[in-house]
Amino acid sequence: MGRSGLLDLEKQYALYGAHHRNPINYFLHLLLLWPTLFSALVLLYFTPTFSQLEFSPFGKNLSLNFGFFSALIYSLFYISLDKKAGSLAALLAFLSWVGGSLLASQLGYSLAWKVVLATQLFGLTGLVIGHVFERRATPVLENLIHVFVMELFFIFLEALQTFCGYEPYPGFNAKVQAKINAQIKEFHEPNQKKVS
């Protein structure tokens, strides 16, 4: 829809889709991606504080720190990709920041970093295993932003499509599927030449 580069939702979602077709890989991403972000926000609770917010429902203060600004950047980026699904993903990112902050304040740093390390190792191992089933590596070397920022939104968007039939605009799914098919064909052609 007239966008280019990182904000070209069709192109970026097709890149994600071409690397995430296997149902086991999809399930592992659905299960593990957002908890991996949540655990990172737990650790970012302990970064320097720029300001405090009174959060009366829990009687706690929330710190405007690197965790807050990370959630804010993720949120703005997701909204710029698609206003409706992006707003829901932004809400999820901010709820992750709030929940991560509350959990971190209860755990304290000495326990929190151990929980985060275990969660990250478990999550990243599961994601790598998912790509073993996919038989195609995630595009880490192609685009770090895609892996560490966009995949969170894309697994959320895919869940909205699967469970709610959501499309950012009419015809989006068909256009993306055509691009996915072209990328998969392009990927398989050099491999077929090697075999023959």
Image (cartoon, rainbow, N blue to C red):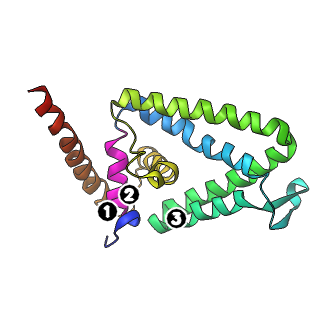
Decide which of 118, 1 is in the foreground and name it. Answer: 118
Amino acid found under the numbered disc labelled 3? Phe
Image quadrant where residue 17 sits: top left
What residue lies at 52% left-to-right and 30% top-to-bottom?
126
Amino acid found under the numbered disc labelled 2? Glu
Does dot 3 land on a helix, a strand or a loop? helix
- Report whether 141 appears left or right of 108: left
What residue lies at 61% left-to-right and 32% top-to-bottom?
121
- For mark 1, does the 10 Å Cα neighbourhood hold few (<14), some (14 to 19), or many (20 or more) residues? few
Horizontal and vertical percent position of residue 66: 71, 59
What residue lies at 84% left-to-right and 66% top-to-bottom?
53
- Report whether 169 appears left or right of 76: left
- Numbered label attached to residue 77: 3
Does dot 1 land on a helix, a strand or a loop? loop
- For mark 3, does the 10 Å Cα neighbourhood hold few (<14), some (14 to 19), or many (20 or more) residues? many
Q: Is residue 169 above or below residue 178?
A: below
Q: Which residues are magenta?
A: 8-20
Q: CA distance from mark 2 to mark 3?
A: 18 Å
- Numbered label attached to residue 167: 2
Labelled pair 2, 1 in contact (Cβ < 8 Å): yes
Horizontal and vertical percent position of residue 41: 69, 50
Q: Main secondary structure of the magenta part?
A: helix
- For mark 2, does the 10 Å Cα neighbourhood hold few (<14), some (14 to 19), or many (20 or more) residues? some
Q: CA distance from mark 1 to mark 3?
A: 22 Å
Decide which of 89, 127 is in the foreground and name it. Answer: 127
Does dot 2 land on a helix, a strand or a loop? loop
